[in-house]
Image: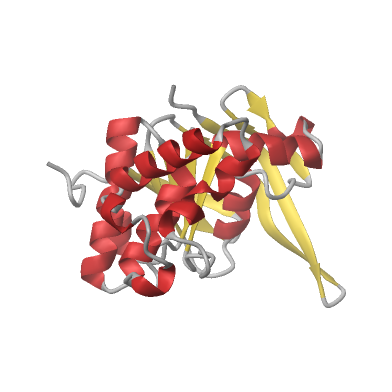
Amino acid sequence: MAVPINLRSVTKSYSRGGETLRVLDELDLDMDGGTFYALMGPSGSGKTTLLNLVGGLDHCDSGHVAVGADNLNDMTSSELAEWRSANVGFVFQGFNLLPVLSARENVELPLLLAPLSKSQRREQAERALELVGLKDRMKHKPRELSGGQEQRVAIARAIATDPQVLLADEPTGDLDRETADAVLQILQRLNRELDKTILMVTHDPQAAGYADKTIHLDKGKLGRIEENTNITGAN
């Protein structure tokens, strides 16, 4: 079931060089479940901080962050870790694949925390690789793959546990246009066919065009939310 994401009066500050820097400032934001969102804004506007809060990688200073019925502020660090492993998949600009492992073994990594047998882990990893069109490359190591293929393996790893939410931080930042478009089409398909709620940080307006809606942040505050009426890659 697709889950919504809701933030209420969220404030987050960091200390740097003796100064306190407020990155998110009383932010209110509602995101519908099963929707693909692009998150845009200038550097320092709070995009990655917002992603980290939604993914349970950090706590806000005040306010609350809810993903579906789960209020993340009520969880301890260990509870958040358990929640993340079951509910959130992360895709980063750097692929973060282990070079000594095959594609399938990389995808299996998050499944090691799940109560699954070795054959079940292999089956789920292969299914995830099939979803991103790389089942025929499952025995290849990262150095034997192109950049686009590595990112597709990273996406397969993110969805291997069948999370409700996918969080992507500049997932196409290191890719050429053609390869980036192929990766974005996969994210779009995961949203439409598997009903994943996706929040993607990007500086690229063309990448944002694959999303259903674009959220604009500016100095830690919500600027506007735009409906993308001419969605790239749409059938």
Residue extending farthest to the left is 235
Residue 221 in view (yes/no): yes
Q: Quadrant of the C terminus?
A: top left
Relative side of 50 to 21, left or right = left
Q: Residue at x 57, y 62 (%)?
A: 45
Q: Residue at x 43, y 29 (%)?
A: 33
Give above or below for 160 relative to 176: above
Q: Residue at x 40, y 56 (%)?
A: 153
Residue 155 placement (x, y as % from top left): 41, 52
Residue 2 placement (x, y as % from top left): 43, 26
Relative side of 154 to 182, left or right = right
Relative side of 121 to 46, left or right = left
Give above or below for 73 relative to 187: above
Q: Residue at x 81, y 37 (%)?
A: 76
Residue 208 placement (x, y as % from top left): 33, 56
Give above or below for 12 relative to 177: above
Q: How was this image coloured?
A: secondary structure
Q: Nearer the viewer, residue 209 or 62?
A: 209
Q: Nearer the viewer, residue 187 or 85?
A: 85
Residue extending farthest to the right is 18
Q: Quadrant of the N terminus?
A: top left
